[in-house]
Image (spheres, rainbow, N blue to C red):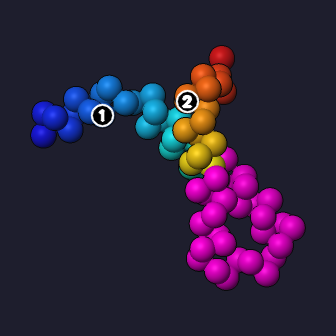
Amino acid sequence: MKKISEVLSENIDLISYSMLGLVFWGSIFNAILLSFFPDFGGSLVISSLPYFVGLIFGILAKYKEWSWIN
């Protein structure tokens, strides 16, 4: 349990950027996808793709040191 808390405390920035990318940017990308292609809403793979892109966007933001909140 102590090891888990150490890993979480060392990587809290990466986790927070990843979650922001997953939830915030993933929701935006999903809304854009569904507004342009409404027929893709039924497929689980297609619906989860924008959230995966948002997660990658959040991880890139951490490593590229992009500042979303000043």
Q: Which mark is residue 8?
A: 1
Q: Is residue 69 visible?
A: no
Percent across and percent down for residue 27 are 66, 55
Question: In this view of the protein, which residue sits in the foreground, 15 or 63?
Answer: 63
Q: Is residue 53 above or below residue 19?
A: below
Badge 2 amino acid: Lys
User: How far apart are the alpha carbons under marks 2 and 1?
Assistant: 15 Å
Badge 1 amino acid: Leu
Quarter of the picture holding the N terminus: top left
Dominant secondary structure, magenta? helix
Answer left or right for 15 relative to 51: left
- The residue labelled by disc 2 is 62
Q: Is residue 58 visible?
A: yes
Q: Nearer the viewer, mark 2 or mark 1?
A: 2
Q: Quadrant of residue 46?
A: bottom right
Residue drawn at the location 27% of the way across and 33% of the way down: 7
Residue 29 in the magenta stretch? The answer is yes
Answer left or right for 67 relative to 59: right
Mark 2 touches mark 1? (CB < 8 Å): no
Q: Which mark is residue 44?
A: none
Question: In this view of the protein, which residue sits in the foreground, 62 or 17?
Answer: 62
Residue furthest to the right in view is 36
Residue drawn at the location 63% of the way across and 42% of the way down: 57
Q: Residues within 10 Å of mark 1 (few under 14, many from 20)?
A: few
Give the secondary structure at mark 2.
helix
Residue drawn at the location 30% of the way across and 27% of the way down: 9
Give the secondary structure at mark 1.
helix
Q: Residues within 10 Å of mark 2 (few under 14, many from 20)?
A: some
The part of the chain drawn in magenta is 25-53
